Amino acid sequence: MKMCKRQEIFQGKIIKVFLDDVELADGSRTTREVVYHKEAVAVAAVDENKNILMVRQYRYPIGRDMLELPAGLVDEGEEPLQAARRELREETGYEAARWDLLTAIHPSPGSHNEKIHIYAASDLKQVSDQCLDEDEILTCSLIPADDAVKMIKEGKIMDGKTIIGILLYLAQ
């Protein structure tokens, strides 16, 4: 597939939206709507008792609270692991002595280029209170791993990066 023409439709703080005219492998032409999203990270932080550190926050696009792993955007010039460490501390007040990359995912490649790096964090220590961005309102709690898996099966945890992070952490 080859891009022939690109029109920027929207530029926001986190995303850009383009309408691309493309030529397919058979020579026919069509359009693709593409959302370019900043890179992100998520952290499956698990304590010595197999409790998973999770955050609950209201997600406007779906109109409800979601239970998720701590997560956030990779800042300009920042490496994903640095961002994961920063986000864990900001959203929960915890730090971890051990870090492992579980995977990186493209959650919606049909229209978005977003890439999320998912890390495992262990040997946790609470070092401060939350230090949230001015537009963030969230609470954190420790959820037993067995309860989290049950909540995934029951549809109470529906966030893709969270499901992947929990299940990959527990499969190690």
Image (spheres, helix red, strand yellow):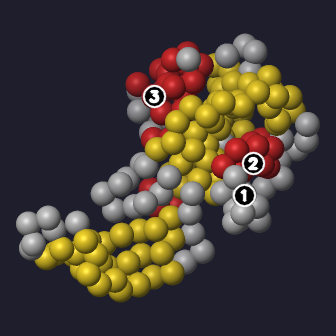
Q: Amino acid at mark 3?
A: Ile
Q: Are marks 2 and 1 in contact (CB under 8 Å)?
A: yes
Rendering coords of residue 92 (x, y %): 77, 41
Rendering coords of residue 120 (x, y %): 65, 30
Question: Which quadrant of the figure contains the C terminus?
Answer: top right
The disc, 3 or 1, on the residue closer to the chain's N-terminal end is 1
Residue 82 in view in this figure: yes
Report the residue at 51% width, 17% height from top.
171
Residue 26 tag number: none
Residue 143: quarter of image: top right
Q: Amino acid at mark 1?
A: Glu
Q: Residues within 10 Å of mark 3 (few under 14, many from 20)?
A: some
Residue 69 in view in this figure: no
Q: Which residue is mark 3?
A: 152
Horizontal side of 112 relative to 87 (left or right) equals left
Secondary structure type for disc 2: helix
Residue 82 tag number: 2
Secondary structure type for disc 3: helix
Question: Which quadrant of the figure contains the N terminus?
Answer: bottom left
